[in-house]
Each structure stands twice: as structure tokens, then as C-alpha cells.
Image (cartoon, rainbow, N blue to C red):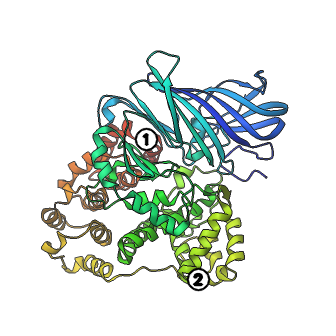
Amino acid sequence: MSHRDPHSYTDLNQGRVQSMDLDLTVDFSSKTITGKADFHLAKAMGGPMDLDTRDLTIQAARDNAGNEVEFELAEADSVLGSRLRVNLPDGTEKFSIDFTTSPEASALQWLDPAQTAGGKHPYLFSQCQAIHARSVIPCQDTPLARFTFNCSMTVPEELAVVMAAAPGEKSPAGKAGMTTFNFAMPQSIPPYLFAFAVGNIASKDLGPRSTCYTEPEMMEKSAWEFAEVDKMLLAAEDIFGPYLWDRFDFLVMPPSFPYGGMENPRLTFLTPTLLAGDRSLVNVLAHELAHSWTGNLVTNASINDFWLNEGFTVWAERRILENLEGLEAKSLSAAIGRNGLLEAMNSFGKGSEFTKLEINGEGGDPDEFYSLVPYEKGFLFVALLEETVGREKFDAFVKKYIDHFAFTSLTTAEFEEFLNKELPGVADQVGAEEWIHQPDLPANAPVFASARLEMLEGLAKGWTDGIRPEVNEAQNWSPEDWQIFLQALPKCLTSEDCAWLNDNFLLNEQGNCEILCNWLEIAINSSFEPAYDRTASFLGEVGRMKYLKPLYSALHGNENTRALAADVFAKNAGGYHFIAKVGLEKIFSG
């Protein structure tokens, strides 16, 4: 197989790592992980083997017999990191590398006790998507190179380790005060799904296949919020077929986690911003669950094909939502998503490469062009396919697609070939060429309408004409209602209008982060001073990029709040994840 991933040094013509045995030791004092990786090859080989690394210190490389072999660590590229070339003797079936991570490893966040819910113990977690696994372990860091692994992780004895893998026995380590946790991942995964966390972590079973993990102080809220996970799992199996990862456990993360969720198989990571207290944001859990099929089981070949992961997953998430809550709930969710899509497309500009489904991201940093486009444009394309051929026929197609490509990574071209074979003529009928390979949003994008959606958007559009919602009625709106309404309002209001909204609906005190972020963005654009303190405190409470980027952009973009933006960022930047911090720095430098 030729080298096809522009974001990896991997050349699969050299050979492929089939499995890894990892022995890792975590040192909180130096903020490093010291490790040994044994690489088992799919077949014996000799010659150069190129691996991806980023800021790793390589101590030694050894062959089958334990003899040291030559290696070369190339000069670092700002996006790709450093190519590690190991020169292997003929007949090599296994080789090993000794290495140490950097305290600034891009995939790792080291938290002081004060940054945790309990305040007594440090915490460490990984976030390897899209190309950050190379900062934790030397690897073929491309979705094309799926692998299985066994991992032993040694940590201070007062802490626990959880990993996106099947847990094994734990035992005292050879070093006093340390404990070793053992894990195995028998199903092959792409490297970006390698994930773990270390901290004061408790657990509670929520169903026959699901356990909630989090810090003890967050367990009651977390277990209640996601108590219906088993219903979601059964609803997802109705769409996709059997769940093949044995368990669907999840970890509710510290606030600095930069995403809404991460679909690590067997242990999904979730932001604590989902703990709204009313289960109104659990659709994120449904999204990560759907990734168990579209993403984890069938995986994009590279970041250029990212829409294959996310478009199908958003479609599945909303099908699960429809199954559990009805068609109107799906329509409201789709409308919120479309608003986000249009904002993302506007930020890139008309005709941008990054408003296509299949993109050419070569030379760019995936974190910099990450957006809602592959999610929401991808969803609309998949929904159009379903609408065109009918639900029953499309569901059969999706199940065949999953079965055919299970535990493999495919390109957009391979998807198109499968689509043309299984649903002949449909690609031409829906204009797939325009959807996949052209920028912007095609005119035949599906529209999900409902009477409630029309009412809410109508109220918002009438704001400038003096139309206001009935206070008693709006106080009983659902969180989705409020998101739709706030997203449809003018982005800049008078101070009097902002005061009316805040006085009547206590928006500064909102516990739902989606509503709060939408409101604060309007308030900052409007220079509404009573919202400044809440904006500052909120930006110190969360690390999720979905909230950080729009609020810092609004603060920095308003000359009345530009100094506040700089002050708040200086105060909180140390608590943000590397991925989030780099993105925010670009706002200030732009």
C-alpha cells in the first residue's frame, strides 16, 4: 500500500506495525512519561522503518535479539514533528524503542491538584486526535496503520489509571509507592484513539455494558446526567447492528478537556460542560457512541477524509435522538447544527478548500482547519442520500457499509466507489460531485422544518420590529428552544435589549453552557457590561474550544473588551489544553 497520508511520515511499503507492547511510567514531578515500546510487524522485513514522533527523546532502538540498531531522528517539522528512521536488519519481526516524552507533549495535559474537582491529587490525560499520538509514543501516526496493543502503566499508588482498552490486573510496581495497571486492546484501532487518564478516579456501573468514571466529587452529577446510556446503546444497535467493542464506558473529564467528547473505544471522554443538570446535552454522548461504528470501526484514511467519520456520526446521532425523543427534537438539533455550519463556512470564506467534504490539507495543521464543516455538511449529505433512496433502503446500505469496511480505514474515493456499486445512479442524482469536491453548501441541502422551529426563528427575526417573546411562556422553553432563539437574534443588541433579556430570563446565571455561551457572545458584541464578569468567570471554568473560541473572538473583536480579553487569557491560559491554547493565541495575533 502506498503512502497516502500527508500528515504522517509513515510509508506502508516499508512495513506495518500490527501490534505494540507498551511499558510506560508516569512521573508527575517531571511531567514526563518514560517508556519502552515493542513493535510487532505484520511480516518480517529489513531496511528503514519510518515512524512519527513529536518532541520525544529516543534513548535506544533494538532488534529481535535485543541488539541496538541505528536510528536517525530528523529535524522537526512545525506540523509533522520529527521523522524517526530505524534501520532494521533483514528478517526483523519485532523491534523496540526506549523513549521519554517532553513536559510539553502536545497530547498530554498535566493538571495540578488545584485544577481538579477534588483539589488533592494531580491528574493527567491524553488527547491524541488528530496527529498528537506521536508526542506520546513513537508510532505510524496515521489512521491507515491500525494496531492492537497491550499496555502496562506505572503511576503513584494513590492514583488510578483508566485506558481506552480492556483493564487487566493491577499490582505493586518494582518501585516503592508505585502501582502498575495493565490493559489490552484486542481490536485494532488507529493511533489517534490511543487514550488514557491518571488521577483520583472512581467508577459506577450504569448498565450491563456501561460504567461511568470520573473524580468522586463529580460522580453523582455525572451518573445522573448519563443514566440513560443503555437506551442509547440499544437505539444505536438498531441503526448499525451489533456493538463490537464489548463495553461502552465513559470518563467525565476535568474542565480543561478541549472537546465536547472524544470517542476513544471502550472509554469515551466527555467534557463536564455537559453536566447541565437536566440531561439536555446528552446528545454528545449519543454522538460519541455512534462513533463506535463510524469512526472507530470504519475510519477515515486521513484527515482529508474526516467527513467520513463525522458526517455519518452526526447523522447517526440525530437518528438516535429521533428514536428516543421524536422528529421535532431531531429538527431542532439539525437547525442548531446548520447555524453552526453557516458560521464556520463564513469564517473560512466563500470558495474555501475547507468548505469541501474531501479536502486537501497537506502542509496545514489539522487543528487549525478543524471546524463544523465535516460534521454538519457531512450530515446534510448523508441525510440527502437517506431522503433520496428512502430510510429502509439506506439503513440496509449503512449496515452493509459498516460490515464491508469494519476495522479498516478508507478514502473518500473508496466510499464513492462503494456508493456507486451499492446504490447505482444515486451519486449523480444527488450531485455527489458538488457535495464532496466543491466548496460551499449545495442548493439541494435538506431542510429540517418544524412548527416550533418556525415560531422561534420568527420571534427572533421580529426582534428589531419590537416583537418579544411572552415572558411566562419563554421561561418554560427547553434548552434547545433557547439555543435556536439566541442563535437567530441579531448578534449586536442595545444595552436596553440585553438588560430586558437578562432581567427576565436570568441568562447570566444559566447552567446550560450552550445557552450561556450563545448569550454571552451577544452580550459581549453588544458591550453589555453586566455580562463582563460572568464571561470572565466562565472562561476560567471551561476549557472546551467550542466556547473559548467564540467568546475570546468576541472579546478581542470589540475594542471595548479587548483589554479584558487579554487579561482573562493571561489569567487562565495555563489551565487550557495545548490544542486550545494554540488556537486562542491565533485570535490574539490575528
Would you identify the image quadrant in which residue 394 lies? bottom right
Local SS, label 1: loop
Q: Which mark is residue 389?
A: 2
Residue drawn 60% across and 51% down? 364
- Asked whether 174 or 550 is in front, the reply is 174
The three-letter amino acid code for the residue at tag 1 is: His
- Mark 1 or mark 2, whichever is nearer to me: 2
Q: Which mark is residue 92?
A: none
Residue situated furthest top in the rendering: 176
Vertical order, 396 against 276 (above or below) = below
User: Mark 1 touching mark 2, by CB under 8 A?
Assistant: no
Q: Position of residue 442 (x, y in %)?
A: 55, 78
Vertical order, 541 against 32 (above or below) = below
Left or right: 206, with 523 as reference point: right
Q: Is disc 2 surrounded by few (<14), some (14 to 19) or many (20+) residues within 10 Å?
A: some
Residue situated furthest right in the rendering: 90
- Asked whether 44 or 254 is in front, the reply is 44
The three-letter amino acid code for the residue at tag 2 is: Val
Q: Position of residue 19 (x, y in %)?
A: 68, 40
Q: Is any atom of residue 590 visible in this view?
A: no
Q: Which mark is residue 577?
A: 1
Q: Position of residue 39 (x, y in %)?
A: 70, 35
Residue drawn 53% across and 27% down? 33
Residue drawn 60% across and 81% down? 430
Q: Position of residue 16 (x, y in %)?
A: 75, 43
Would you identify the image quadrant in which residue 464 lies? bottom left
